[in-house]
Image: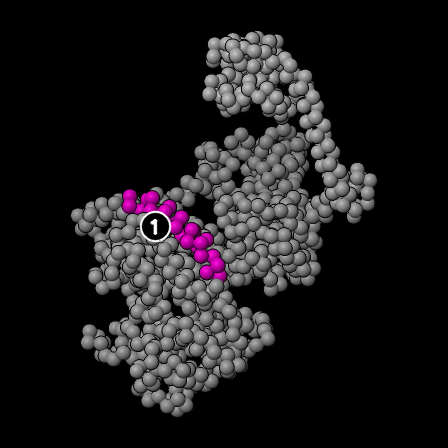
């Protein structure tokens, strides 16, 4: 009987075990969102978590490693989004198996290991395999031919595109050698010398062996790495297709359950229609991607990683519509993903409900506008066709984006199906215009006039920020704005906004508040309360003239409030440490959602499901303070934007950054893209104290903290409060809690005692009252005043009296501080005839108030105590009438 093919998870196991047995450390997958590398959106290969090891910037206790790495290829240098569903071998999310040598073994050993594994434990027949090597890599050629014994016609030399690997445009790189399966000549292939670079489908690449030798910089220059290294990557899904002998990744067991769920939920079977098959595969692929993204802490948003998630999810939702599903369903497919992968990735299983919930919400949100957007798009497509044009106008594409939430690539995807394209320039222009409008309506001034002023000022002036290096400098006043208009001068008392060409004042951005300080001229002085950047390139100092007069053109001395700035700096660097500590303690899904850094405090919002426990908060505080104690110097690098991205980063909303980006790191524990001002070393922060933690939206928590002198002050105040408490308790601080507990206990005993006495007194009082009951038309009615009693007492007394009367109606009235309280009870035998609630409503009116209650008991309040006797009379009358 033929052996059952190896299952996907067995292939993963076999691969990792093979290398473990050969001295490789089994390292867990790095997170999808790379840690400490703000320039890269997602891990796109196994080597990402080892980048610094290749560069020789970091050493670990091993020189060989093996991993199964979660990868995404949806942006940047490696972007396969458009291939997904259309080729049998591309995914957005996939797992990359790899083995790594950090300056240990090189080419020969790497090739031998790979060959041994694929032809041995993985059971591929050697005759079906071919390999490629880089152009002039004779070494590699020789190893394959002489060492392994592959015939020369099965070793192909290819160029840079195929056989030179790099994570991004800069960073570690080198020539590579790839292993392919040869599926035999394709009848449709017209390529005379078809080779592995041909896309006819004859050859399937499944394993890439990279001979890491260089570090490429932004200018393209390559410097040799400290030691030649090995980085290999084999897609698990492709390996599974090859090992299981199926024609496509989607036919492997890794996708079986997921596709089954997609078919079940859509009611469409695979094989019924080729286009529907594409949709089913896209849905299956995207369900894996969104499951892992949400699992790693990414939430749908309008920028960065969150936008990638949104785009993938909306694309999947639209394919759902193509399958005839117009309700949220992807979350159900995600559930099948977790069934499939939960063993290998236990966090997914733990977060199952959360993941489903997040996906379903985003699906719901998009479905609200999806069908309207699609209707608009269809109509536009008909028009474009009628005009015999091949492109859809940028304005329409923008409208779809802006009003209906269609990401650009979703519209493109739909148009592609009709053989149409997008007017990209028109779309960019419409987007640019919207940004311009948004900028004009800058925060703090909804007024168009002011927006215009700044727009105009910015066209003449631009401000250079020099405040990273200095806190004061001299520079003439270039413009003064008062009451929304440009003026030549301003005098004492005027609220002004000042523009200069250079400034040490930091304008609010990235969560850090604007600097405060002072501007002095020969004839006047301005206190600056805030600094803003209303338009790109223009910094505005807001404040008030407090002395004399200031004029445009005059020389001025600009001076930042150094103390406030120092405190802000501590809080900002503290925020970075807090962020790093949060991620260490809670996991990488704790992602920044926002922050506020002022001189007084810091606030940090992040994604997380549950309130933090006391222990978690303590661990976060401890970690941050350990890093502070280590006094790691800040490393600030300003890289050209291009280079930063080239190092692996792709920003989606590129305009968010200028030409240059700053990367701030402290030691090896914190690295962030940030334009703010920072401490010279972590030790400057002094101390970090978390004040508290709350939820601000579902899945988003907020932490507030203090640093440095602010933290000390807070602790001191706490200490003073405690000392006062202790003094009041007349006990040493340490004994205060025990003392207080005792006191509370004594208090509880006294309350009980008091309650007992009250009950007794009530009993006595009602005993006296019961004799005042009158007989009215055969019903015993008692109406009396009980002025000492409060609400609870009254109720107790009414109960008492009802019992004592056995059958009857009781009305008590109490007067206190001009207000009247009435309480009325009816014994059970009479509730059929007299309803307490109804009676009291009438009585309440008499004393000028309102009331209500149940048939056996009701209460009312009123203002007119003088009418109490009248209310009593009325009750008698009502009973007389039989109510
Ligand atoms: P291709 O040319 O087929 O897109 P690649 O050259 O981009 O592949 P590498 O960057 O060398 O691939 O990645 C190493 C391995 O990772 C590949 O051999 C393949 O097994 C797997 N892989 C790469 N991209 C994908 C993807 N989008 N989906 C699934 N597996 C992939
Ligand atoms: Mg590729």
Q: Residue at x 68, y 62 (%)?
A: 630
Q: Position of residue 666 (x, y in %)?
A: 61, 60
- Report the front residue among 434 and 728: 728
Q: Residue at x 73, y 32 (%)?
A: 753
Q: Is residue 722 left or right of residue 587?
A: right
Q: Is residue 861 above or below residue 164?
A: above
Q: Is residue 779 above or below residue 583?
A: above
**Label 1: element kind:** loop
Q: Is residue 469 visible?
A: no
Q: Position of residue 280 (x, y in %)?
A: 29, 60
Q: Residue at x 62, y 23 (%)?
A: 800
Q: Please say whether residue 358 is one of the residues in the magenta stretch.
A: yes
Residue extent of the magenta highlight: 347-372
The rendered magenta stretch, by its main secondary structure, is classed as helix
Q: Is residue 779 left or right of residue 302?
A: right
Q: Which residue is mark 1?
A: 328
Q: Residue at x 53, y 55 (%)?
A: 590
Q: Position of residue 339 (x, y in %)?
A: 40, 62
Snapshot quadrant of residue 129: bottom left
């Amino acid at each position: 009987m033929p052996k059952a093919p190896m299952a996907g998870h067995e292939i993963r196991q076999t691969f990792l075990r093979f290398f473990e047995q050969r001295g490789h450390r089994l390292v867990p997958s790095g997170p999808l969102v790379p840690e400490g590398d703000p320039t890269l959106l997602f891990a796109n290969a196994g080597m990402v978590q080892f980048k610094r090891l290749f560069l020789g910037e970091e050493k670990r206790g091993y020189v060989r490693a093996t991993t199964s790495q979660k990868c995404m290829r949806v942006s940047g240098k490696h972007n396969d989004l458009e291939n997904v569903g259309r080729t049998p071998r591309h995914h957005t999310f996939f797992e990359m198996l790899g083995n790594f040598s950090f300056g240990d073994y090189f080419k020969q050993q790497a090739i031998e290991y790979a060959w041994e594994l694929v032809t041995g434990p993985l059971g591929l027949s050697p005759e079906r395999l071919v390999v490629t090597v880089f152009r002039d890599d004779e070494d590699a050629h020789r190893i394959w031919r002489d060492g392994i014994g592959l015939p020369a016609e099965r070793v192909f030399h290819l160029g840079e595109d195929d056989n030179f690997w790099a994570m991004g445009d800069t960073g570690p790189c080198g020539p590579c050698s790839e292993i392919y399966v040869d599926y035999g000549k394709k009848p449709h292939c017209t390529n005379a010398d078809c080779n592995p670079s041909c896309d006819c489908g004859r050859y399937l690449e499944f394993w890439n062996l990279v001979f890491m030798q260089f570090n490429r910089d932004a200018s393209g220059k390559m410097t040799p790495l400290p030691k030649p290294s090995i980085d290999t990557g084999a897609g698990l899904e492709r390996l599974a297709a090859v090992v299981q002998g199926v024609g496509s990744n989607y036919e492997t067991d890794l996708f079986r359950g997921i596709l089954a769920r997609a078919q079940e939920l859509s009611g469409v079977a695979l094989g019924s229609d080729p286009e529907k098959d594409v949709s089913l595969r896209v849905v299956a692929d995207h369900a894996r991607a969104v499951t892992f993204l949400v699992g790693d802490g990414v939430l749908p948003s309008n920028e960065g990683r969150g936008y990638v998630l949104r785009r993938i999810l909306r694309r999947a939702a639209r394919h759902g519509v193509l399958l005839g599903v117009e309700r949220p369903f992807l979350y159900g497919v995600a559930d099948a993903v977790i069934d499939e992968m939960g063993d290998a990735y236990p966090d997914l299983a733990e977060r199952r409900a959360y993941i489903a919930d997040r996906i379903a919400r985003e699906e719901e949100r998009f479905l609200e506008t999806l069908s309207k957007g699609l209707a608009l798009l269809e109509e536009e497509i008909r028009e474009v066709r009628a005009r015999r044009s091949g492109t859809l106008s940028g304005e329409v594409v923008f409208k779809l984006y802006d009003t209906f939430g269609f990401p650009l690539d979703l519209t493109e995807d739909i148009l592609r199906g009709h053989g149409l394209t997008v007017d990209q320039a028109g779309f960019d222009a419409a987007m640019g215009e919207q940004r311009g409008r948004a900028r004009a309506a800058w925060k703090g001034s909804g007024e168009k006039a002011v927006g215009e002023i700044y727009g105009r000022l910015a066209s003449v002036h631009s401000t250079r920020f020099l405040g990273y290096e200095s806190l004061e400098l001299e520079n003439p006043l270039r413009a003064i704005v008062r009451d929304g208009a440009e003026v030549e001068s301003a005098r004492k008392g005027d609220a002004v906004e000042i523009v200069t060409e250079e400034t040490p004042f930091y304008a609010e951005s990235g969560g850090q508040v604007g600097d405060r300080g002072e501007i002095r001229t020969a004839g006047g002085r301005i206190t600056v309360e805030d600094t803003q950047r209303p338009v790109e390139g223009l910094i505005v100092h807001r404040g008030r003239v407090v002395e004399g007069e200031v004029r445009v053109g005059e020389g001025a001395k600009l001076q930042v409030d150094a103390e406030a700035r120092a405190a802000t700096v501590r809080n900002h660097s503290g925020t970075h440490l807090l962020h790093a500590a949060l991620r260490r303690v809670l996991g990488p899904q704790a992602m920044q959602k926002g922050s506020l850094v002022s001189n007084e405090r810091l606030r940090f919002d992040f994604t997380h499901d549950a309130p933090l426990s006391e222990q978690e908060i303590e661990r976060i505080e401890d970690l941050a303070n350990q890093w502070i104690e280590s006094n790691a110097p800040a490393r600030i690098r300003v890289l050209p934007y291009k280079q930063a991205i080239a190092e692996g980063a792709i920003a989606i909303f590129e305009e968010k950054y200028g030409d240059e980006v700053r990367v701030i790191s402290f030691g090896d524990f914190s690295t962030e893209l940030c334009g703010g001002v920072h401490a010279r070393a972590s030790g400057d922060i002094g101390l970090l104290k978390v004040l508290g933690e709350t939820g601000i939206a579902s899945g988003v928590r907020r932490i507030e903290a203090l640093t440095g002198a602010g933290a000390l002050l807070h602790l001191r105040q706490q200490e003073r409060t405690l000392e006062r408490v202790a003094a009041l308790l007349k006990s040493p601080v340490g004994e205060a809690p025990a003392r207080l507990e005792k006191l509370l206990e004594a208090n509880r005993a006294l309350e009980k005692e008091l309650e007992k006495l009250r009950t007794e007194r009530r009993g006595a009082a009602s005993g006296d009252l019961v004799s005042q009951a009158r007989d009215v038309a055969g019903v015993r009615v008692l109406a009396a005043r009980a002025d000492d009693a409060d609400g609870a007492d009254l109720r107790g007394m009414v109960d008492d009296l009802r019992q004592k009367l056995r059958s009857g109606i009781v009305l008590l009235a109490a007067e206190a501080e001009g207000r009247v309280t009435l309480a009325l009870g009816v014994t059970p035998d009479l509730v059929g005839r007299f309803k307490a609630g109804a009676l009291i409503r009438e009585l309440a009116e008499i004393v000028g108030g309102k009331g209500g209650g149940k048939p056996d008991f009701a209460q009312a309040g009123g203002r007119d105590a003088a009418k109490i006797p009248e209310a009593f009379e009325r009750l008698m009358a009502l009973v007389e009438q039989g109510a």
